[in-house]
Every structure is written in structure tokens, then in C-alpha cells.
Image (cartoon, rainbow, N blue to C red):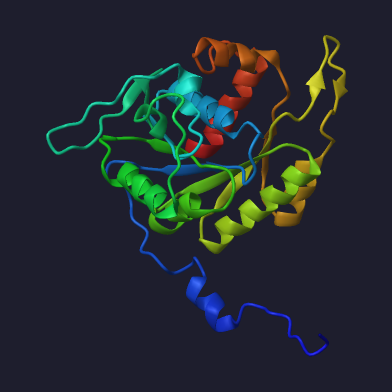
Amino acid sequence: MDSDKKVNLTQNFRDKIDPKSQFLKKKIPGVKKIVAIASAKGGVGKSTICANLAVASAKRNYSIGLLDADVYGPSIPDLFGAFEKPTADENKKLNPIIRQNLKLISMGFLIEKNSPMVWRGPMVISAIKSFLNNVNWGELDCLFVDLPPGTGDAILTFAQELDVSSSIIITTPQKLSITDANRGIEMFKKTNIPVLGVIENMSFISDQNNNKSYPFGENGADQLCKDQKVDLLDKIRIDETFNLCTNNGVVYESLAEDIKIQFSKISEKIIG
């Protein structure tokens, strides 16, 4: 067995699969800015953060769209309490569902609520391309894209084919989440998408006296941002008002006032 050789990717093969130059990135007509919200790890509250950022931006009188790109686990319909089917125009282009002054599109609008998606990669890519090319987004100041966890087919399709203005990484302070967030940042670097910054979600718990406890660890995102030389946009605490919003199907409105202010300030950094 000493004669066995360890296998590594050859440089020639690396060059062929390198995501930097396989596709020509394109814009969506009428959409000024596209912002990708990613986590590289599930369970960190990415969709919730994305939805609240979108609503906070709309409340600042911007025209906002939200594309739920998580084909296997769409969350946007539940967050907004929106379960109707979208209509289509004479050219078979989808008309977004309207909620809270947002234009929404999700695979969850096109399938039954409890139906599992058992598609292979090529079908997922085809669905995502349809969302990019066959939706009547109209004129938007910003389209938020809620990306699925990981760095797989769906994310690479967006990163390689769409002219994304910037990306935001959502993480929790936990070591495993920080490790995956680091991979997410590296992926965006490889696809030439600027990383606007990191949001640390579920950062801490605060009691009535403003004493903080850190059930998932402390300062994980601080070190990540220092290592990657990106900005820490904010730290969002664990708060029961998030669950209240989810249960009511109305995003943002029932949040604690200080958290609303946080989302509004992050929106300023994203859109201006």
C-alpha cells in the first residue's frame, strides 16, 4: 500500500471547474440592485433575516422584490402567510405575489404546501433560471435573493449567471456556523461577488435589566470578519417577537422597536 498515490485535483481540472469564468453574468431588466442573502448553513435564521430586511427597505419607500431561491425548503410563503398561486401574463411570465408592499416569488407558491421537492440538480437549475428570466419584477430598487443553505447548484447558478450587486452572510456565533460562513464568503470571492458584510443572528439573550447571556457562544462573527476583512453589519439578539411575527404571517411589524431600528440601519447600508 506504500506505493499508493494520494489523489489531488490537477490544476488543469481545477481551471475547468473554477466558477469564476464559466458564465456571462447578466442583469434583470428594471432591477437596479440584486443582493444575495446566504448562510452556507441551515438553521441560522437566514430567511427570517432576509424577509425583515426586505420589509424594512420597503418601509423606507423603496421598491423591493424578494426571491425565495430555496427550491427544496421554501420559507417565504410561511413567513408572509401567502399560499395562493401566482398568475401569469400572455407571455407566460409569472406575476409576483404582493405582500407588505413587496413583490414575492417562491417555489412554495407553485407546489402544494406539504409536497416534497425530489428534483435532481438540473431540474433545480432550470427552475431557478425560470425565476430569473420569467418573472414580471417591474421596476425595483433592490431584489433580495434568499439563497438556500450550502454552496451547491442553486447558489452557483445565481452566482455565475446573475449580476449580483453584493452579498450578506448570516451566521450564529457557534463554531460550526462560523466555519460554514467562512466557506460562504470564500465562494462569493471565487465568483467575484462583493461581500457587503456579516450579520450575527441569535447573538445573545437580553433580560429586563439588559444583562446579556450567550447561549451559542460569544464574538464568533467578530473573529470571522477580522479574518476575512469584511464588515460586521450587526448582531441580532434572540427575541420572542420574531416568533410572534412568524405566527401571524406579518413580517417585521410586531418586532421589538430596537430590532426594527437595526434592520432599518442595515437597509441603509445595503441600498443607501
> Is 137 above or below relative to 223?
above
Q: Residue furthest front?
A: 1
- Figure check: 241 above or below 136: above
On the image, which quarter does residue 77 sit in? top left
Camera-nearest residue between 35 and 44: 44
Residue shown at 44% from the left, 51% from the top: 120
Q: Residue furthest left?
A: 90
Residue at image point 60% right, 82% down: 10
- The spot of residue 183 in percent (x, y) is 66, 55
Question: Nearest the camera: 269 or 246?
Answer: 246
Relative image position of residue 100 (x, y in whole percent): 41, 17
Q: Residue at x 79, y 90 (%)?
A: 3
The answer to whether 22 appears left or right of 2 in the picture is: left
Residue 140 falls in image quadrant: top left
- Name the side, left or right, on which 27 lies relative to 231: left
- Taking 228 as reference, is 37 above or below it? above
- In the rendering, at what x and y percent does residue 115 appear? 44, 29
> Could one spot residue 83 in this view of the protein?
yes
Label tally: 0
Instruction: Using residue 226 as the reference point, say whether residue 245 is left or right of it.
Output: left
Quick one: which residue is furthest to the bottom in this view? 3
Residue at (49, 67) in percent of width and height: 20
Expressed as whole percent of the image width and height from the top left, the position of residue 186 reads 63, 58
Would you identify the image quadrant in which residue 48 lies?
top right
The answer to whether residue 66 of the structure is visible from this angle is no
Q: From the viewer's perspective, tell me whether residue 43 is left or right of residue 100.
A: right
Q: Quarter holding the N terminus?
A: bottom right
